[in-house]
Image (spheres, coloured by chain):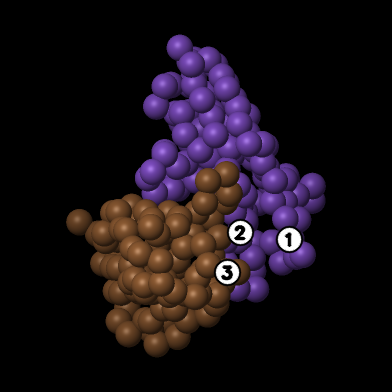
Amino acid sequence: GQNIDQPTEMTATEGAIVQINCTYQTSGFNGLFWYQQHAGEAPTFLSYNVLDGLEEKGRFSSFLSRSKGYSYLLLKELQMKDSASYLCAFIRRADYKLSFGAGTTVTVRA
Amino acid sequence: DGGITQSPKYLFRKEGQNVTLSCEQNLNHDAMYWYRQDPGQGLRLIYYSQIVNDFQKGDIAEGYSVSREKKESFPLTVTSAQKNPTAFYLCASSWTGGSNEQFFGPGTRLTVL
């Protein structure tokens, strides 16, 4: 079977750093996506990791360990507009379908 | 501007009625997808299509139907057989292949009265 887990909620202060962890179990893993979704809106793409290691894009970085079935999204210098749900999703090699976690709601406080 | 559109944004229907949600993309993507999102849950795949005139059931296809007569369009019909249709419905498209991100439309919020 397949499974993907991430924390339900996280709260942090403006300017701080938050790390959102994601663990997954699947056969035929091909890669891992992170999406940001503001309430009532469409998810927007943040990152895609295929190989092990850290990928940095400005204030956001994403890490993948294929052997551990583990990823994290790191949000630095938090801003109020970063308050959103962050969705972790893996893609399978067999059919290229995405399987999503339930999402982590991040609340940034002043 | 290239993009993916869904209409309407909000939709109300009476119990027992079928309703069709529209999804159009002008990104020239081959693959299109329909997801359902409920509070506190991740996106769940309803149907997907990787080429015109072909589509496959996702994880929760019961009570739904789709068609893919044109590359640009992938309408979803929520039938009266769907027991709990009130949800946020998201359409997405992508190139075929494993590393290509899915682009999402703005979503349709369906409420059954």
Q: Colour of chain B?
A: brown
Q: Secondary structure at mark 2?
A: strand
Residue ID at (45%, 42%): A37
From the image, tell me which residue sits under label 2.
A99
Q: Quadrant of the N terminus of chain B?
A: bottom left
Residue ID at (45%, 57%): B86
- Which picture quadrant has residue B87? bottom left
What distance separates the C-alpha of mark 1 from that of mark 3? 15 Å
Q: Which chain is purple?
A: A
Kindly give the residue lying farthest to the left in the view shown: B1
- Do the dots labelled 3 and 2 sit on one chain? no
Rate crowding at label 3 as few (under 14), some (14 to 19) or many (20 or more) other CA atoms within 10 Å: few
Q: Chain of mark 2?
A: A
- Tell me the number on the disc at residue A2: 1
- Tell me the number on the disc at residue B60: 3
Residue flagged by tag 1: what amino acid is it?
Gln
Frontmost residue, A30 versus A89: A89
Image position of A93 with respect to B56: above or below:
above
Kindly give the residue lying farthest to the top in the view shown: A110
Rate crowding at label 2 as few (under 14), some (14 to 19) or many (20 or more) other CA atoms within 10 Å: many
Q: Position of residue B61 (x, y in %)?
A: 54, 73
Residue flagged by tag 2: what amino acid is it?
Ser
